[in-house]
Image (spheres, rainbow, N blue to C red):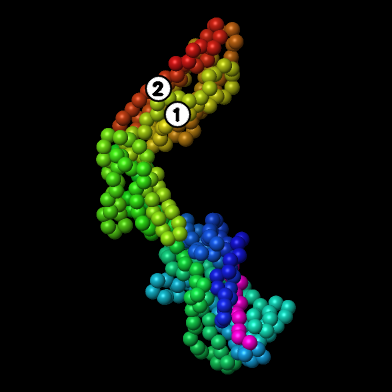
Amino acid sequence: MANIILAQGTGVTWTTALYQSGLLTHTNGTRYILKNNGLEKTLDISLGVERSSDLIGSATIFDAYVAFIDASGNHLLTTDTMSFHSQDFTGPNGTPTASGLKQVFLKIPASFVMPGRLAVAYRSRASSSQTTGFFVVHEERAIPVVVETQFDGPDNICSEATYTITYPGTITLENATGIASLTALGNNQWKITKTGSINGVVTLKSQQQYDKYTKTVEIGSMLPTSIDGNNILNAGSHSFILNNSSLENTIVWNARSQSNNVSITTFDNGNFIQVNVSNWNPYGNNQIILEVTITSPCGESTTLTRTLGAGYGGPIEET
């Protein structure tokens, strides 16, 4: 739960606590980040009214609600309307010029995803017999609602690929010199093109007014050059990782030994493994050979071999 003041001043004041059956974020009251995560969101709002001193003792009634307002000014989602009478401006919760707070809820359906703003709408009535009147939106402290950028496109490209970017900000391609170029196609689509023989990793970035969103894209084949990990000198589980590999690669491991029972457990699509050695004879030949073949999505492949363990005379020289 986090409380933030969304509006205050002559006329209306409100605070809100943000809840959700998942992750809901905002930052310093500057904006509300609406996440497209398929979850319903509920804003738990404490709503109150301030009045000028010349209204103390009057029968003036204030009505107020909180609204989700789109760019055209339409109130697409609203809370219940709360009415504030003279008794709401008394203790213990109220003062002569500030009412006590009343709780309202703004429910945002799971399928509701769009930018806009959150603001209070309010009106005053001379008495309870007056049932009509225009609501005024308190814009001075309205909270912008922003939607996080979403990238739709591959994580690895061999020559070129098109990306659809929903709710984009300013779109750029970083760390791409000599590797790839970016072309705007219109209709929220951009194309990344491999520009030379250099393989590498670039970053597709969307810079909104307040927030930055990125997607990492591998250009060409990301083939490892070594199997990293400590030598094996006893029974147990031993960890190894492929240097500078990719989760997009197809990886096939093999381990063999003349005198040890050896098996492999793979993680992260084979980029990380555990070599399981179930027996160890300190006086025998415990040489273990690891071999891995890596094939990239672009069809390039490499095979790496590493010799581990110990021979009859002690630890062997690794290769």
Q: Quadrant where the N terminus lies?
A: bottom right
Marks 1/2 in contact by CB < 8 Å: the verdict is yes
Binning the other alpha carbons within 10 Å of mark 2 as few (below 14), some (14 to 19) or many (20 upward) gives some
State yes or no: residue 49 in magenta.
Answer: yes
Binning the other alpha carbons within 10 Å of mark 1 as few (below 14), some (14 to 19) or many (20 upward) gives many
Q: Which residue is drawn at 54% across and 6% down?
A: 312
Q: Is residue 119 above or below residue 135?
A: above
Q: Residue at x 53, y 81 (%)?
A: 122
Left or right of 283 on screen, residue 75: left
Q: Report the residue marked by disc 1.
A: 242
Q: Which of 31 and 178 is in front in this view?
A: 178
Q: Is residue 21 above or below residue 128?
A: above
* Residue found at the far right of this picture: 92
Magenta residues (range): 44-53
Image location (x, y in percent) of residue 214: 41, 49
Could you say which disc has been placed on residue 304 in the image? 2
Q: What residue type is labelled 2?
A: Leu
Left or right of 90 on screen, residue 272: left
Provide the secondary structure element on which disc 1 rests: strand
